[in-house]
Amino acid sequence: MALVNIDQVHKYYGDLHVLKGVDLKINAGEVVSIIGRSGSGKSTLLRCMNGLEAYQEGAIIVDNKEVSSDEKQVRLLARSVGMVFQSFNLFPHLTVGENIMLAPKLVLKLSSKEARELALDKLTKVGLAEKIDEYPDCLSGGQQQRVAIARALAMSPKVLLCDEITSALDPELVGEVLRVLEQLAADGMTLILVTHEMNFARDVGDRVVFMHQGKVWESGPAKAVFAQPSTPELQSFISAVL
Amino acid sequence: MLNFSDLLPYSHLLLQGLWVTVVLTLYATLGGVAIGTACAAGRHYGGKALRGVIGGYVELIRNTPFIVQLFFIFFGLPAIGIKLTAWEAGLLAMLINLGAYSTEIIRAGLAATPKAQVEAARVLGLNPRQVFFRVVLIPAFEKIYPALTSQCIIVMLGSAVVSQISVMDLTYAANLIQSRNFRSFEAYLVVAAIYLLFAILMRQVFEWIGRRVFRHRRKAS
Amino acid sequence: MIEFTNWDLLRNLLLATRWTIALSLTAFIGGALVGLLLTAMRLSGRRPLQWLVRGYVEVFQGTPLLMQLFLVFFGLSLLGLDISAWSAAAFALTFFTSAFLTEIWRGCIDTLPKGQWEASRCLGLSFQQTLGRVILPQAIRVALAPTVGFSVQVIKGTALASIIGFVELTKAGTMLNNATFEPFKIFAMVALIYFALCYPLSLASQRLEKKFNGAR
Ligand SMILES: Nc1ncnc2c1ncn2[C@@H]1O[C@H](COP(=O)(O)OP(=O)(O)OP(=O)(O)O)[C@@H](O)[C@H]1O
Ligand SMILES: [Mg+2]
């Protein structure tokens, strides 16, 4: 069974039909980029994958666990699914190290010493080991986002969800975050990214999923999809953004 | 155990009391906001002495209980030759009280008006008074309108205390009724409910007025 | 008529002030505890609890504190409890304080970005953990200034306990006035003592406000 199985998922916000029967399977180790116009439902789909949003029809199964927005289930899922946000969402009252150690200590019941080692290890991965005792406010946007990635990694998730994680950054800071993602991909991490970085999607991603009007409109190997989009919608989207 | 039917014979007292509370609130709201506007303008534009006096007034009122202000006005002022009826003393206390709070609220609104807008108006040739009323005061009121109206409701609720100097307001009616029929709890429960409804009504009316007066903002957003 | 020197007056008022302070502290601490409970109920996400809290706040913010005092005083004696003016005042002021603090804290918690809740949820933190480790530590910094500011309202609110016969500062003032017929002097003194209690707290609240707004 694939790591992520999305089967005919429908999602409504009141009367607004946002996801209209999404099917998607993602295998362990895959790097999948989700692209599409604003409002096509990319964020919503991602947020349904870890229970942040409830969906009304269909099924999502991640790491053999049924996804629901039930409080207990969301907590259980947090061990399999990590998430990084566009706006970092670091906890400003905690140091970088404490941000990373919080969940491993409270949820995984690690000792302080184990948690700190873990934090140091993950920070080293994102190249910020020396910032462990700083507060997030003292870091640049790119550094904060790398800390957020380290925080998500500390729960050893099977899959990492990233929703436009470079969109809030100054252009010169985007590269450092993308390099971290590239490294994660090389290490075999399963990544699902909503992104506007088309070059990254093409060069680092294994697969591209193009969403349109609440559906998976087209999907396939990254390079092939960019080279030869088969639907007119994707053709026009690509020519608009590239 | 509870018996509300004993209150029925006294409903006219409740209505009279409510009327007094309504009238006091109306006068206090209009007068208090006027005092507040004048003092806020004085504090914002005035000289050092004026600012000091207004500041002292605001802090003195905000840091002492309403009931003490009321007693001072009603019992204390006659000692220096200022004799007021209970009703006048009650209204004066409410005016002074709301005046101080609204000074502080309106001042915050004035301070929040962007300098650039004042400069723009000046450049367009408006005189200082026009600038104050058209460019500074109206937007300031719009900003602080919710805080100001909640303060008016707080003062209305606080006015229950004027019953203590025998102003025949709603609370006075409750005191009177319970002294006659010995149904204290029921009397106060009913009167508390009337206050609650009046407070809710005031909020609705203020919201309605706000929607009419500040209509342009709604269209924009 | 008994002769009172100014010093006698002041001394008697200051002695009664102890009860104003005791009642204020009781109401403030009690109100903060109840307010904390109400805040947790409101954040729990359970509809019936949220409605309950909203109704509670609405009732205590929408009725005069004096009515609340009367209702507690006469309501409890209706239940057959022989209640002292002190306990009636303490209970009523506690309810009053808790309703206002709940509302103040609601505002403070709502200013925190939604992302803080979402990030905690994604990391697997429980509701209590999120509240205790992520939300409250941040909300407290924002809430400190308005909470201290509200303590002034509590102190002023205790003056109403005089009406149900509890002898605190205001009641002492009226009693002394009845004995000496010097209302101008006595109520001015009473007012100044309240001012001396309240003004430092008002100042502290303003300072805190500046400090934390400046820091952000
Ligand atoms: N909380 C919400 N309540 C109501 N409607 C919402 C909500 N969140 C999103 N929507 C609507 O759902 C649709 C899909 O939104 P979504 O955020 O998934 O789009 P997106 O593809 O991520 O777009 P973008 O590129 O702008 O982030 C949009 O029409 C949006 O207005
Ligand atoms: Mg989005």
Image (cartoon, coloured by chain):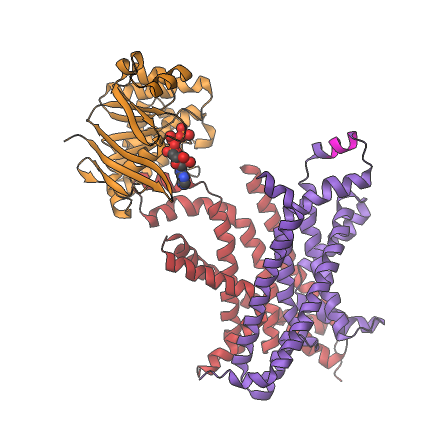
Image position of B144 (left or right of B91): left
Task: Name the residue at 19% across, 31% down.
Answer: A3
| Location of ligand 1 given as a quarter of the image | top left
**The chain in red:** C
**The chain in purple:** B
| Residue B165 in the image, given as x and y percentages of width and height | 70, 76
Determine if the magenta segment contains residue B62: no
Q: Compared with residue A118, is residue C141 higher up or lower down, i.e. above or below?
A: below
Which residue is outermost to the top? A227
Image position of B206 (left or right of A30): right
Is residue A133 in view from this perspective?
Answer: no
Is residue A68 in view from this perspective?
Answer: yes
| Residue B63 in the image, given as x and y percentages of width and height | 66, 59
Which residue is outermost to the front? A232
Residue in front for this viewpoint, B121 or C167: B121
Task: Name the residue at 51% across, 46% down.
Answer: C142
Q: Compared with residue C166, is residue B42 higher up or lower down, i.e. above or below?
A: above
Determine if the magenta segment contains residue B119: yes
Q: Quadrant for the N terminus of chain A, please.
A: top left
Task: Name the residue at 34% across, 17% down.
Answer: A200
**The chain in orange:** A
Residue in front for this viewpoint, C60 or B214: B214
Q: Quadrant of residue B166?
A: bottom right
Q: Compared with residue C30, is residue A73 higher up or lower down, i.e. above or below?
A: above
Q: Which residues are magenta?
A: B118-123
Q: Quadrant for the C terminus of chain A, please.
A: top left
| Residue A38 in the image, given as x and y percentages of width and height | 41, 28
